[in-house]
Image (spheres, helix red, strand yellow):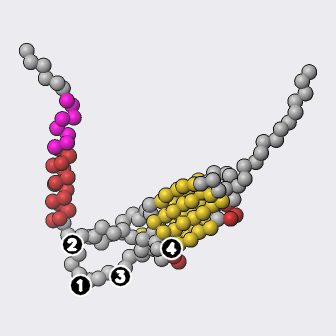
Amino acid sequence: MTLVRFEPFRGIESMLRRFNELFDELDRSLPVRFELGTFSPRVDVSEDEHNVYIQAELPGVAKEDVKVTISKDGVLTIRGEKKQERKVEERNFLRVERTFGSFSRSFMLPENLKTDQIDARFENGVLTITIPKAEPSKPEEVEVKVR
């Protein structure tokens, strides 16, 4: 009797490849539709010894269309809108991949930040928010009497 190793996921890779080929073929054959997609900017959050940095990629968004707010409970929100260019009726689009529309990204900030000193700069399609860290409070030392 010959032993055959059981591989439960053996055929899945070829099945997924076939599905991808099918959907690629369908994508090429369907007419292009103009729909507003969901635009969600990519964001990096980093820190160093003195600051927390939030950088959001906002290509195609005007500086005037971006709003940064911070709530009393420490939630920083970036809102804006990537507006669609005027429609070009005489063009026959073969593929449309860019997305447009309103967006909102929120971040819960730690308590050790000076939220009244936030700096936001918008250059070359990148919004950079710098939030200074507060000096850590030194723990108070309380003497306990030993009986």
* Residue type indicated by callout 3: Arg
- In the orientation shown, which residue stands out farthest toward the top? 1
* Residue type indicated by callout 1: Glu
Query: In the rendered structure, which disc, 4 or 3, sits on the residue that comes first in sequence?
Result: 3
| Mark 3 or mark 2, whichever is nearer to me | 2
Query: In the rendered structure, which disc, 4 or 2, sits on the residue that comes first in sequence?
Result: 2
State how far apart marks 3 and 2 are (Cα).
17 Å
Residue drawn at x 70%, y 55% is 134
Check if residue 114 falls in the magenta segment.
no
Residue 84 spot, x, y in % from top left: 38, 76
Q: Which residue is mark 1?
A: 90
State how far apart marks 4 and 2 are (Cα).
32 Å
The prevailing secondary structure element of the residues shown in magenta is loop
> How many residues crowd around disc 4 within 10 Å: few (fewer than 14), some, or many (20 or more)?
few
State how far apart marks 1 and 4 are (Cα).
33 Å
State how far apart marks 1 and 2 are (Cα).
13 Å
Range drawn in magenta: 7-14
Q: Which residue is mark 4?
A: 123
State how far apart marks 4 and 3 are (Cα).
24 Å
Name the element at disc 4.
Answer: strand
Which image quadrant: the N terminus?
A: top left
